[in-house]
Amino acid sequence: MSTVVATAPVLVIEGLTVGYGGVPAVRDLDAKVHAGEILALLGPNGAGKTTTMLAAVGAIPVMSGSITALGEPLDKRVERNARRGITLVPDNRGVFHKLSVSDNLRLAHRKGGADVDVVFEYFPKLRGLRGRKCGNLSGGEQQMLALAKALLPRPKVLLIDELSLGLSPIAVKDLLPRLRNIADEQQMAIVLVEQHIDLALAIADSAIVLHHGRVALSGPASELSAQREKVEAAYFGRVDGPNDEVAAAAE
Ligand SMILES: Nc1ncnc2c1ncn2[C@@H]1O[C@H](COP(=O)(O)OP(=O)(O)O)[C@@H](O)[C@H]1O
Ligand SMILES: [Mg+2]
C-alpha cells in the first residue's frame, strides 16, 4: 500500500455541487487523489456516487465548486478529458457484447497506449478468451475486459463505477487486489465505487462515505476500517454532516 506522497494530487475536487435540472444530487464534496492512490467512494443507492464520477470526467456540468485534473481545470468535453488520461469505467461497463474480446480490445487501443500484453499480465484469463464473444463471458470476465479496455490508453486517473455489480463475492475478491497492483505499478490514481465496504477499505488509501449527496464520513481507509460502526452509521445516515475528527486525520 502506498505511503504519503509529496507530489501534487492528480485529481482535486473542491466544494463540488452537481446535479440534474438545477437540483443538486451532490453537495459540497471535497476529494483529493494522488498518483498511485485508491479512493473508495462508498454510500447507499442514490447517495450521489455515479453523479460524482460523471462530474469527475466532465460528463455532467458542475453547479458550483471546481474539479482539477492533472494540474488543469477539467474540460467540459468528456473526450478531451479522456485524451488527457481521465477515464471512467461506467456501471454498465461499456463493453460491446456482440464483439469478441480481441475486437473489444482492438477498439480501445490508442497510439502511444499500453500494449495488450501488459493488460493480459493483470488479467491473464482474458488471453485465453480472445476469440470469445463478449456477450458469452461471465460477469467477472466482462468486468476484466472492461478494466483491460480502460487500461489500454494508459489513463492517469481511472474511475470505476460499481465494480462488483452482478459479480460473485469471489470475483470481487479476485479483482480488487489487482486494482491495488495496477495503482502501485502504473502509478495510476483510482476512484472506486464499491458496495463491499470491507473489501474496498482493505485495498484503498482513503475513503469517502456519501449519504444523500453529502459527505457523511471521510478519511484514511485504515482509520475507517478500524471504526467500522462509524462507517456503517454514516452509510445509513445516522451521522450528521462531515466527521471533522476523521476528516482532519486525513490531512
Ligand atoms: N439523470 C438523472 N436525472 C435526474 N436525477 C438523477 C439522474 N441520475 C441520478 N439522479 C438522482 O441523483 C441522485 C444521486 O444518484 P446517483 O449519483 O446515481 O447515486 P448512486 O450512484 O450513489 O446510486 C439520486 O437521487 C438520483 O435519483
Ligand atoms: Mg451509481
Image (spheres, rainbow, N blue to C red):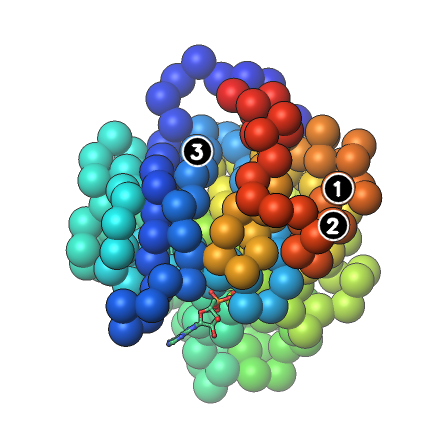
Split into 4 quadrants, where in the image is the N terminus?
top right
Which of 191/237 is in front? 237
**Against 229, is 87 above or below?**
below
Q: SS of the residue at dot 1? A: helix
User: x, y percentage for residue 76?
Assistant: 18, 55
Q: Quadrant of ligand 1?
A: bottom left
Q: Earlier in the sequence, mark 3 or mark 2?
A: 3
Q: Which mark is residue 32?
A: 3
Looking at the rendered structure, the kind of residue marked 2 is Ala
Tally of numbered discs: 3
Q: Position of residue 57 (x, y in %)?
A: 32, 54
Give the x, y percent position of residue 91. 51, 68
Query: Does the numbered disc 1 mark a residue whose Cβ is under 8 Å from ligand 1?
Result: no
SS for callout 2: helix
Q: Is residue 73 above or below residue 133?
A: above
The residue beneath circle 2 is 233
Which residue is labeled 1 in the image? 230
- Is residue 245 visible from the viewing direction of this image? yes
How crowded pointer 3 is (Cα within 10 Å; few <14, some 14-19, many 20+) is rated as: some
Asked where in the image residue 171 lies, by quadrant, the reply is: bottom right
- Asked if residue 28 is positioned above or below residue 24 in the image, the reply reads above
User: Between residues 25 and 130, which one lies in front from this camera angle?
Assistant: 25
Return the x and y of residue 159 as percentages of the image width and height.
46, 51
